[in-house]
Amino acid sequence: MKTKLSFFLVAISLCMSVLAADVPAQLFMRGTALAESSTPLVMKRINKDFPDFYNGAGEISNTFELFTALKSGNYEFAASESGAAIISSATITVDKEGLVPYRIRVNFDESTPEVTVSEVEEMIIWAPTKKFVVANLDYMGNSSFIIRGLEYSKDTWGDPRYRFRVYTADGDIKTYAYKKGNLTGPDDDSNETGYFDLYQTTAEGQWDETIDGVKYQGAEFKLSKKRRGEGFTLAPFDVKVVFDPVNNYTHVISDYDPTGIISTNAVSKGEVYPTAINDQVTIAVEKGAFAVDFISATGITVLQAKSADNTLTLNNISLPKGVYLVKIVQDNNVLSVKRVIKL
């Protein structure tokens, strides 16, 4: 009996060694495909995907992740900056200009690590109360996405609760929110308690999601009193999401500065600010003349304008309240389409 048990344990051990690869303490991505760095970039070992890691209760996964811009070239992965590659070199072709963000994942659950390199097609702020896309964030480099000049409106948001969603080209959707459920929003935008750190939550449902017969209640963030106008005057603000490969994923909310530096990548695609419009809006591109069309929710072009240089400010906008798409066109090519709210 003892011999049989020993053999059984050995068999289990051998089976496990076949099924799972050794997980390195660290993982680095390097190569000519890195658009933002000439040196290796460290990757983050992430928590298990939702619902395995739910409301902060779960385990670390065997997956490393990195958000960064890529360009045409080669890449490989190593356990140290200068050590031998543990995953051999591959190539990628990137046809788009500017900083093109990708989400790179390396999973060590199987004997052969699985590498997934997928373009980030969209990063949004989502208001679950009205199932409303508040804004699209632009990639600004350094694993960060930003929207400038955002303003809270109860009419469009429904209430101050919000989540972030990342859509990648492989069809995957990841939703991020507060890890402990829906708590009262903070008084200010400081992150001393970790309130603004990002954790995965329900992806498809408005508030909850049922997976394999189990219902999971979603989580969300809530704007601070300052941003939702409780005791403060409503004013535009900036939101930056940082997928930090070393520290917690988080987001930063700060006062909107119309004279601040606009990310080069955002301008190359065209930027509109603020995204919540009273009677003035500015559209900027990297260089050259361009034209803009404001398109209503019913698909009707309600306002058109042209600029002889790279910046256009429209004053005394008298459009009805609602959501509009701003199409930015240059040399007969659509640079981008931005979503704005007329207050």
Image: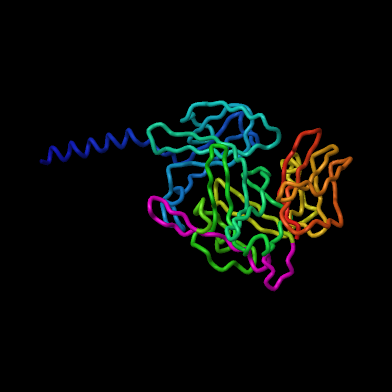
Name the colour scheme: rainbow
Q: Quadrant of the N terminus?
A: top left
- Farthest left residue in view: 1
Q: In the picture shown, does residue 61 fall above or below 250?
A: above
Q: Which residues are magenta?
A: 208-235
Image location (x, y in percent) of residue 213: 38, 53
* Residue at position x 54%, y 56% in the image: 177
| Viewer-closest of 106 and 296 | 296
Left or right of 317? Residue 250 is: left
Q: Quadrant of the C terminus?
A: bottom right
| Residue 200 in view, yes or no | no
Image position, residue 268 (x, y; %): 75, 39
Residue 243 drawn in magenta: no
Q: Residue furthest right?
A: 308
Measuring 58% from the left and 46% from the top, which residue is drawn there? Answer: 166
How many numbered marks are there?
A: 0
Q: Is residue 307 visible?
A: yes
| Quarter of image, res 67 | top right
* Image position, residue 137 (x, y; %): 66, 48
Q: Residue at x 64, y 36 (%)?
A: 37
Residue in front for this viewpoint, 266 or 291: 291
Observer-nearest residue: 318 or 41? 318
Q: Is residue 234 magenta?
A: yes
Q: Residue at x 64, y 31 (%)?
A: 71
Whether residue 83 sits left or right of residue 240 in the image: it is: left
Left or right relative to 195: residue 136: right
How far from the left and from the top, in percent, is residue 181?
50, 62
Is 191 situated left or right of 5 in this image? right
* Relative vertical location of residue 169 with respect to residue 277 in this rendering, above or below: above
